[in-house]
Amino acid sequence: MDNNHVKITTMKEVKAIVKPFKVNDILNQLLEAGYPNVTVSMAEGTGNFKSDESTISTHFSITDSQVAQIEIVCIDSDVEKVVNIISSFARTGNPGDGIIYVSNVENLFKVKTGNNVEL
């Protein structure tokens, strides 16, 4: 197998939508646990929880809160650990803390070469 075709076990994508002020704590814990490859995006969203403090976004007429989206791809056996870290450090105990979901990763491609990384 050459460097362009690395055999990997089954991969999963863990995506979490959390309160932005919790991101630094979550990222520090993920880094400490050995997960340095994390993507964080700021977004706007709406969910079941509605607060008296919610405001209508100036960017989108149907969203009412700022959220952070954390994405991490890991091997299948690490999913529980990653989810536990995120949920533990994102939790405030109040409604609207967020959501985490896990998806299968079917293919990986290197941007530099365009080559598929075998799963």
Image (spheres, grey):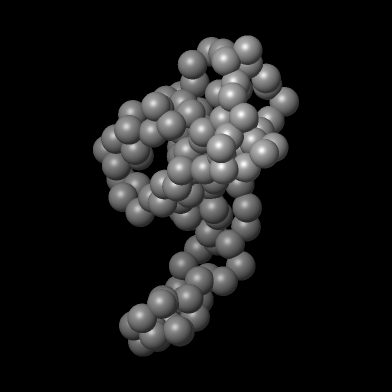
Nearest the eye: 58 or 62: 58
User: In the image, is residue 118 above or below residue 46?
Assistant: below
Where is residue 80 shown, x and y percent of the image? 52, 38
- Give the residue at x 61% y 47%: 102
Residue furthest to the right: 48
Against 76, residue 29 (above or below) is above
Residue situated in front as seen by the camera: 69 or 64 = 64
Labels in figure, total? 0
The quarter of the picture where residue 52 lies is top right
- Please state, as top left, top right, bottom left or bottom right, where the N terminus lies in the image: bottom left
Residue 58 position within the rendered picture, expressed as x and y whole percent measured from the top left: 56, 37
Residue 98 appears in the rendering:
no
Instruction: Point out residue 87 in the picture as x, y percentages from the top left corner.
Output: 50, 28
Q: Is residue 72 in view?
A: yes
Q: Position of residue 14 (x, y in %)?
A: 53, 47
Q: Is residue 33 left or right of residue 39?
A: left
Question: In the figure, is residue 3 to the left or right of 7?
Answer: left
Tell me what residue is drawn at x 48 percent, y 38 percent: 68
Q: Residue shown at 35%/54% (left/top)?
A: 37
The residue depicted at 57 percent of the width and 30 percent of the height is 65
Q: Residue furthest front?
A: 58
